[in-house]
Amino acid sequence: MATAPASDEKVSSLRRVVTASMAGTVVEWYEFFLYATAATLVFGPIMFLGYQVTSIFAGSLAPIIATAILSATGSWVGVAFYLAAAAAITLVAVISLRETKGISLHEIDRVDRERLKAETESVRVPAGR
């Protein structure tokens, strides 16, 4: 009779872990859904959508990669190195951004549009070919 309560405690603990994991996953995917919607509907006209799609794609793969590393190594150390590498890549990207303090971002967008238009016009192939 002494083994029954221990078994019930294990089942109860497992149920609690599974329920918490499912709740966390639902909240995380809801957050991804909201961000994806905001990125396409709100940020799309304001910013270049390619940056948003890249961050959504890379961000959605991060938990999968971390889980794969954890299952392959059996330790959180690999996940910590993965996160440190991701942070280093982010730091390099932020450092390489150009400074926009005191510069009109609308002016930068206008110049970029003109440059892109000039590049696409110079590359056009005649319709007869």
Image: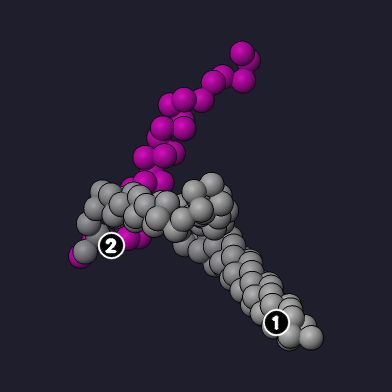
Residue 119, percent from left and from top: 41, 32
Residue 6's disc is: 1
Question: From the viewer's perspective, is residue 42 above or below residue 97?
Answer: below
Ranked by sequence position, the earlier of labels 2 and 1 is 1
Quarter of the image where the C terminus is located = top right
User: Is 115 situated left or right of 96 in this image?
Assistant: right
- The tally of labels here is 2
Residue at (60% x, 69% y) in the render: 28
Residue at (44% x, 39% y) in the render: 117
User: Is 92 situated left or right of 119 in this image?
Assistant: left
Residue 68's disc is: none
Residue at (40% x, 35% y) in the render: 118
Residue 113 colored in magenta in the image: yes
Name the amino acid, label 2: Ser
Q: Residue furthest top?
A: 129
How packed mark 1 is, by other alpha carbons closer than 10 Å (few <14, some 14-19, many 20 or more), is few
Q: In front: mark 2 or mark 1?
A: 1
Question: From the viewer's perspective, is residue 77 above or below residue 112?
Answer: below
Residue 109, percent from left and from top: 37, 53
Visual colour scheme? one colour
**Is most of the magenta stretch helix, strand or loop?**
helix
Is there any visible trace of residue 97 in the rendered image?
no
Residue 84 colored in magenta in the image: no
> Which element is circle 1 on?
helix
Among the 4 quarters of the image, the one containing residue 24: bottom right
- What is the magenta range? 102-129
**Of residues 52 and 81, which is closer to you in this image?**
81
Is there any visible trace of residue 33 in the rendered image?
yes
Residue 104's disc is: 2
Name the amino acid, label 1: Ala
> Which element is circle 2 on?
loop
